Amino acid sequence: MTVADEPSIIRSTLRALLQPRRLVPVVLVSASLVIAQGSFSRDPFAIPLGIVMCALFVVVAPVSWRVLFPERIDLRHGGVRVLLYGAIGAGVVLTVGVVVPRTLGMGRTLLTAPSSVLVCLALFLVGGWGLARDIWFETTLARAQAQVAGLSREAERAQLMALRAHLDPHFLFNTLNAIAEWCREDGETAERAVLQLSAMLRTVLVGVQAASWPLADELALLQTLFDLHRLRDPEALHLVRRVPEALPQVRVPPMLLLPLAENAVKYGPAAGHRGEIVLEVQLSLEDGHLMFSLENPGRYAGRREGGTGLETVERRLALAYDGQAMLKIAALGERTVVEVTLPLAGPITGTVT
């Protein structure tokens, strides 16, 4: 939020002053001054006057500075605003430290002695500037963090857009070539393959525009991917699904799991490793998490240089779940197991729109 976006600089400044990291030291310093004022001054108005002085200094000084200098100090007009800030400080200090005590007929107190009035004026000017500057730095940092978060979402959007082309091009080309052959030899299979490929690409285009979608849609996309691979080589790919019949209404970032399914085929059956690909979804209602796992033949040998699938999934998990989701991949004998743990509550940050 920029200064111009704030509903009121005064209100935002007061809210900032009430934050514990500012309020606690301000209260400690003010309490010390009030106690000293009461100890060195016998006048019954000494302590109330000390409280009023501290309250006015803490509120008026930073508010005045932020109103006069909403962004940073500006001397382009001959320092008129600096002089005005000094005039406000002098007016407040002289009114509370000189005029009010004389009006009330008070004797000399610690905070109203002539030398103390000068000290109070210095505290007003320097303290107000320091508090306002600290609030400005905090506002600027919050604004920068919001911009970084926005850039991160834009980066994720760019990655998601790239998922249109992330589908293994060899898989697409080989599928199209296979469809061309089936058109000559097996028209029914060719038609089924065209419909499945068309449905998959249509789903990908829908997912690119969505911030999140149901887990059921994600699993349906993976199923279509596996079905297309199985059409090309029915003997190579054996899929085992262990998915609850009634899936919870969990939303996930679109195509989050697609790179994992592609890897399971690419480094499993497509690499000559025979065996089952096991897709499993487990729910843990006690701790509010869902675990998705894929197990494929072929021993995991570490991350491959130049590979981006796992890094893409990890980055999207971090952006969408703010550290509450986890990806693990490991070898299990001569097989590879990848697990993704997600909160049942769904993404806690808007991913893309």
Image (tube, rainbow, N blue to C red):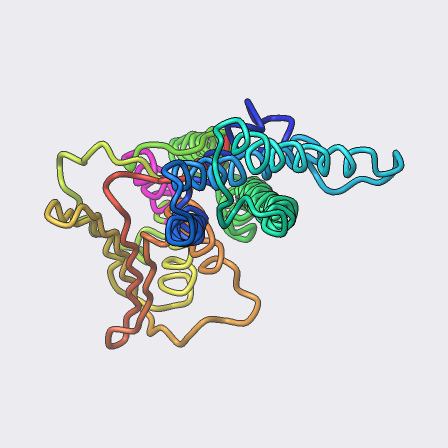
Residue 258 visible: no
Residue found 72% across the figure and 34% down from its top: 87
- The number of callouts visible is 0
Along the viewing direction, whichever of 54 and 63 lies nearer the viewer = 54
Quarter of the figure that contains the N terminus: top right
Measuring from the top left, give residue 248's x and y in whole percent. 19, 35
Residue 321 as seen in the image, left or right of residue 345:
right
In this rendering, the answer to whether 248 lies above or below 242 is above
Task: Pick out the residue farthest to the left.
Answer: 286
Report the span colored magenta: 216-229
Q: Answer with the quarter of the image where residue 2 lies.
A: top right
Measuring from the top left, give residue 295's x and y in whole percent. 27, 61
In this rendering, the answer to whether 269 lies above or below 80 is below
Task: Pick out the residue farthest to the top.
Answer: 7
Measuring from the top left, give residue 7's x and y in whole percent. 55, 22
Along the viewing direction, whichever of 194 and 184 lies nearer the viewer = 194
* Residue 218 inside the magenta-drawn segment: yes
Residue 22 visible: yes
Measuring from the top left, give residue 120's x and y in whole percent. 59, 47
Most common secondary structure along the magenta stretch: helix
Residue found 89% across the figure and 37% down from its top: 78
Residue found 24% across the figure and 73% down from its top: 332
